[in-house]
């Protein structure tokens, strides 16, 4: 006895009429009207992503044209012509795979076959993946499309319409198939499962439709695998095992480790994923989908991942770069690890490090060339570096060695760049700014900023605290970007509120740009209260320090 081969789900549920075509209403309506009104043309071009119904609609159109009751939009499906087309044995309906028959000789053979008399109403040629034809084959096909014999219809199908010559396109009626919508696909898959007398959880169904990328054939193939994999209802774990994906809990744990720069834990999670036999390339795609969803609806994931849209964009950028590398390297995991390490390094600063480094390099080049646009002033800046935590001292010039002045500068912001983001209690007793700076309260303040607003913390560590009075805190920044971000009303108000809570009295915050300080009007009151001024006096004496503007 010969066993009957199992028919895959996507073949079992291939549409037989226009009414059964899923979520391509614009195409169904146009073809239905053309059939009912007798306005069929000799050449059609079906284009769109894979698995969206191009070949299926071509076969439906062939049945509609050659049905014994046709041409009709609703072929009977039981007449000899319909049955022959369904079984693939119809003499007058020929399907050609252009990927395997792409030469000029294949098209010449096709043209010779046009001379035979058709047994049915129409002779129909369905050329799949037509973009694979060679230039010579396209030229041979062109004449036939321009002046086809009577009762001949060409249906060309392709996923890459941009590769088809314009001379061919201009002779076809074009139909663009779009990706099948999620709701329509879910409804169709539920019908398929109902006929199979099987069930699936809503979460698994949601993941399956998302992984299909809008292609019904892909969705049905994955569903078919799941039905074979398990004998009961399909659960999320069954689906993930079949498609080689990682569950969302694991992905959130991985992203949290990256966000907190916990490299050992991150590598441990990757080890667990790889040991479970999961595909790391698929993990990359899943992470990219998750980050994209985070950017679109951040409120949906706020309780699972404290990542801003800007940070998600940074991570998405690095992962998209790693995608190309992983396809061609011998060890794909290394490309993924490098991308995650780069994200962990830059994500606490909001993803602006590269942009700031480029701008700093530009400023250094301009200064070395003597074309700096900053106003001239007697300022003794420190040697510029690209470190996240070191900036130039500003404000006062003095005839003292630069290294001694650097040791005297108050720079609590720079030194707090690597503080732990763990929450620390805020002191409530009153204190002056100097007591705050010299004690542990400033570390407490910066730790809380990093915990609550990591992007703002990344900006603050790029500045230098250079002056404090009883209720005024002044910071200087080298770049316009930092200055503008800190002076946003929401950020400035937030900083003042935190400083007021820290000191136990109302505090004000003011920021400066480096070149602004060079033209700042000095007064005894300001100079005497300037921390850099006082540091210089302590080192060399007031008679050797002067303030120049």
Image (spheres, grey):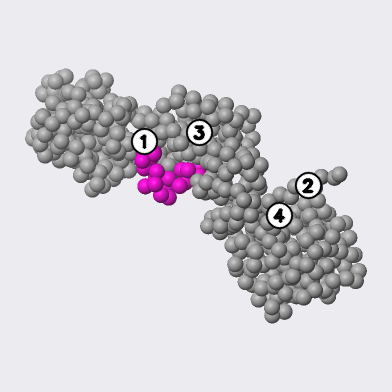
Instruction: Tell me if residue 10 comes above or below residue 386 in the rendering.
Output: below
Residue at image position (43%, 50%) is: 296
Residue nearer the viewer, 349 or 381: 349
Q: Are marks 4 and 1 in contact (CB under 8 Å)?
A: no
427 on left or right of 372:
left
Mark 2 — residue? 5
Mark 4 — residue? 12
Residue 200 makes an appearance in the image:
yes
Quick one: label 3 or label 4, which is nearer the N terminus? 4
319 on left or right of 122:
left
Residue at image position (24%, 28%) is: 424
Quick one: label 4 or label 1, which is nearer the N terminus? 4
Quick one: label 2 or label 3, which is nearer the N terminus? 2
Q: Are marks 3 and 1 in contact (CB under 8 Å)?
A: no
Mark 1 — residue? 349
Q: Tell me the SS state at disc 1.
A: helix
Question: Would you identify the image quadrant in which residue 333 lies?
Answer: top right
Mark 2 closeness class: few <14, some 14–19, many ≥20 residues within 10 Å = few
Q: CA distance from mark 3 to mark 4?
A: 43 Å
Residue range (magenta): 288-310
Instruction: Tell me if residue 424 comes above or below residue 491 in the rendering.
Output: above
Mark 1 closeness class: few <14, some 14–19, many ≥20 residues within 10 Å = many
Mark drawn on residue 339: 3
Residue at image position (68%, 51%) is: 9
Whether 503 is among the magenta residues is no
């Amino acid at each position: 006895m010969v066993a009957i081969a199992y028919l895959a789900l996507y073949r079992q549920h291939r549409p037989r009429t226009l009414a059964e075509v899923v979520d391509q209403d614009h195409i169904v309506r146009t073809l239905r009207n053309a059939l009912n009104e007798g306005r069929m043309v000799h050449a059609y071009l079906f284009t769109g992503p894979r698995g969206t119904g191009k070949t299926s609609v071509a076969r439906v159109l062939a049945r509609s044209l050659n049905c014994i009751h046709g041409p009709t939009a609703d072929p009977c499906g039981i007449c000899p012509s319909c049955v022959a087309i369904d079984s693939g044995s119809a003499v007058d309906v020929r399907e050609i795979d252009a990927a395997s028959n792409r030469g000029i000789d294949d098209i010449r053979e096709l043209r010779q076959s046009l001379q035979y008399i058709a047994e049915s109403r129409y002779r129909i040629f369905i050329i799949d993946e037509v973009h694979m034809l060679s230039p010579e084959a396209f030229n041979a096909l062109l004449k036939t499309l321009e002046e086809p014999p009577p009762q001949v219809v060409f249906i060309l199908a392709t996923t890459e319409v941009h590769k088809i010559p314009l001379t061919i396109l201009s002779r076809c009626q074009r139909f663009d198939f779009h990706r099948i919508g999620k709701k329509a696909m879910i409804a169709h898959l539920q019908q398929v499962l109902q006929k199979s007398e099987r069930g699936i959880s809503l979460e698994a169904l949601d993941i399956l439709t998302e992984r299909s990328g809008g292609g019904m054939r892909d969705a049905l193939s994955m569903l078919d695998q799941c039905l074979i994999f398990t004998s009961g209802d399909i659960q999320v774990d069954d689906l993930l095992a079949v498609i080689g994906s990682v569950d969302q809990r694991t992905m959130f744990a991985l992203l949290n480790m990256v966000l907190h720069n916990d490299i050992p834990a991150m590598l441990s999670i990757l080890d667990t994923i790889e040991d479970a036999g999961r595909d790391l390339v698929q993990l990359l795609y899943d992470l990219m989908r998750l980050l994209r969803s985070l950017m679109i609806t951040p409120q949906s994931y706020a309780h699972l991942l404290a990542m801003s849209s800007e940070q998600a964009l940074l991570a998405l950028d690095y992962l998209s770069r790693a995608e190309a590398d992983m396809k061609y390297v011998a060890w794909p995991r290394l490309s993924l690890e490098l991308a995650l390490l780069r994200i962990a390094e830059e994500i606490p600063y909001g993803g602006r490090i590269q942009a700031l480094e480029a701008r700093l390099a530009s400023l250094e080049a301009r200064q070395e060339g003597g074309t700096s646009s900053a106003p001239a002033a007697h300022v003794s800046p420190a040697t510029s570096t690209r470190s996240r935590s070191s900036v130039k001292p500003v404000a006062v010039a003095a005839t003292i060695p630069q290294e001694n002045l650097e040791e005297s500068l108050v720079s609590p912001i720079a030194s707090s760049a690597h503080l732990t983001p763990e929450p620390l209690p805020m002191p409530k007793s009153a204190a002056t700014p100097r007591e705050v700076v010299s004690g542990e309260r400033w570390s407490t303040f910066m730790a809380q900023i990093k915990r609550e607003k990591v992007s703002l913390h990344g900006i603050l560590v790029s500045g230098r605290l250079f002056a404090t009075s009883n209720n005024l805190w002044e910071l200087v920044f080298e770049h316009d970007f930092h200055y503008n971000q800190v002076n946003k009303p929401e950020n400035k108000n937030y900083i003042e509120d935190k400083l007021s809570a820290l000191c136990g009295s109302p505090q004000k915050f003011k920021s400066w740009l480096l070149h602004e300080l060079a033209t700042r009007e000095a007064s005894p009151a300001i100079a005497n209260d300037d921390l850099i001024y006082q540091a210089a006096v302590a080192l060399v004496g007031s008679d050797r320090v002067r303030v120049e503007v």
